[in-house]
Image: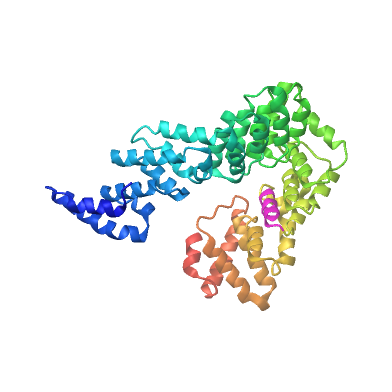
Amino acid sequence: MSTPQDWLTRLKNREAPSSFWASQRLNEASEVLANAEKMGNWVELSRHHNGFIREVAVRELCTQSSPQALAALTERLNDWVPQIRDLAAAGLERYLCSAQVTALLYVLEPIMALAARQRVDHGPSLSAIRRVLQSPDVYAQVYAHFLSRQGKAARYLFALLLEKTAEPETLLRAALAHRELTVRLQAVSACKTLPAEIASPLLLEALSRPGAKVRVCVLNALLPVLADPQPLLRRALLDASPAIRSLARWAAPRHGIDALEVLNLRLSEQMPDTKRDWLGLMGLAFELDAEMPESWRTNALGSPYATVRQAAIRLLRGSSLSALFAALEDPSSKVFNLSIAQLNTCPWASISVELSALLDSDWHPLPTPRREAILQLFPTWQQAAYLLKRMESEPVVQAYWLRQVNEWINRQYAVVDPVTSKAERGALVNTLHTLAKDGLINRDHLARIT
C-alpha cells in the first residue's frame, strides 16, 4: 500500500486543476500531508473537511490495527465521498473475525450511530459485525461486556445476545438484575415470550428487587401466567410502592379479592416492624380511606423513620388535632409541612386557641420558616390581631413587634378573610391607622390594604 509520502508526490505531480476551489483543496492537502506522517494524527485527519486528506488518512488507517482506527473507519463508512466509503469498508474487513472482538466492542457507539445514518445502506456492514459478536466462541466476552455497560450500548448487546443465546434463562436473569433500568424493562418484555414455567420464577425473583417502574411491569407480566395470582396480589396490596398498590387494587376485583378485607386482616395481626411494611399498610389504608386503630397510628407517629411519620399524618382526621399539633414539633420538615397542610383544612374555631398558645410559647425559639408557616394558618386579619396583641402585651420589645406588623403589611396584596367579622376588622384597621399616624408603621403601605 502506498505511503503518505507517495500520495503527497502524486498530488504534487497532478495537472493544475481548472477550478480555483479544486486547486485550493490540492494545495491544502499537500500542506497538511507534508506534516501528517510526522504528527501521526490519522484519526483526526480522517474527519478533515478536505476529501483528499480524508482519503489518505483512511488509507493509512487501513494499515493499522487498533480500536481507535476501527472507530474512525466505522465513522467513514458514512462519508459523503463514495471512494472513501469503499476504502473504509475494505479496511473494516480485517476486523470481522473473533480475534478482533475487543476492538468491535470498543466501537459500539460508532456502530450504533452508523445504524441511524441513511446516506447509503449500511445493513451489510452492520450484519457482518453482528455475526462476529454473536459467534459462540466470543459469547463469554460479549456477555461480560454487556454486564458492565449502561445506556444504549447495554440495550444493543442484550438484544444481540438474546437473538442467539442457547441459555435465555441465564441471560434474562442477569438482564432483570442489570443496573440499566431500560435493560430490565427489555428483559421483562422478553420474559413474556417464554413459557409460563420458565418466565414465572424469573419474574418472581425480579419482583423482589427495588425499582417501582420495573416492578410494576413485572407484576403486570406475572398476573396472566400465574395459576393462582391471589397470594401475589394480596402481598402487592400491602407493598410499600404506591404504583404497585395501584396496580394491585385495579387487579384485585378481577381475581376475587377485596382490598379492604386484606387490610382488615393485616390489622388483626402483629404491628409491622419494618419501614416498608408500615408504608404499605398505611398507604393502603389511606387509599381506601379506611380507619386505623389509634394504637397503630400512635406507634407509627413515634417511628424513627420520617416517611412512616408522614404516612401516619396523612391518616389523621379532624378528631386527631392533638397529634397534628404534636407533629409541628417534628424535626423533619416534610412531616411539619404535612401537618401544616392538614391543619389548614380544619375550621379556624377548632384550632385557634391551640395555635395562639403555641406561638405565645414558641415564637422566638421557632425557626423563621416554621413560625411564618404557623402564622399563615391564621385568617389574614387574625394574623394582624395576633401581632398587635403581642405588641400591646410586651411594650418592652414594642419595636420588634412593630417590625413584625410592618412586614405583615408588606406581604399583603388583596386581603381575603371570610372569618374575621366586619366589626373586628374595622377595629384592627383603626388601630393600624393610629400607629401610622404616630409614624410607627408605613402609612403608604397601609393604604394599599385598607
Q: Does the magenta stretch include residue 336?
A: yes
Residue at x 56% of width, y 63% of height: 429
- Using the rendered view, name the quadrant where residue 176 is placed: top right
Residue at horizontal 66%, vertical 61%? 370
**Residue 218 percent location from the top left of the image:** 66, 32
> In the image, is residue 265 part of the stretch drawn in magenta?
no
Q: Residue at x 19, y 54 (%)?
A: 12
Residue 399: x and y in percent read 61, 76
Q: Residue 424's quadrant in the figure?
A: bottom right
Comparing 272 with 420, the one in front is: 272
Q: Main secondary structure of the magenta part?
A: helix
Q: Visible in this render: residue 50?
A: no
Q: In this view, does 247 lie to the left or right of 53?
A: right
Q: Residue furthest bottom?
A: 396
Q: Where is residue 65 in the image (x, y as percent from the top left)?
A: 45, 48
- Above or below — where is 281 with respect to 234? below
Front one among 272 and 125: 125
**Residue 43 percent across, percent down from the top left:** 38, 52
The region drawn magenta spans 332-342
Can residue 128 be seen?
yes
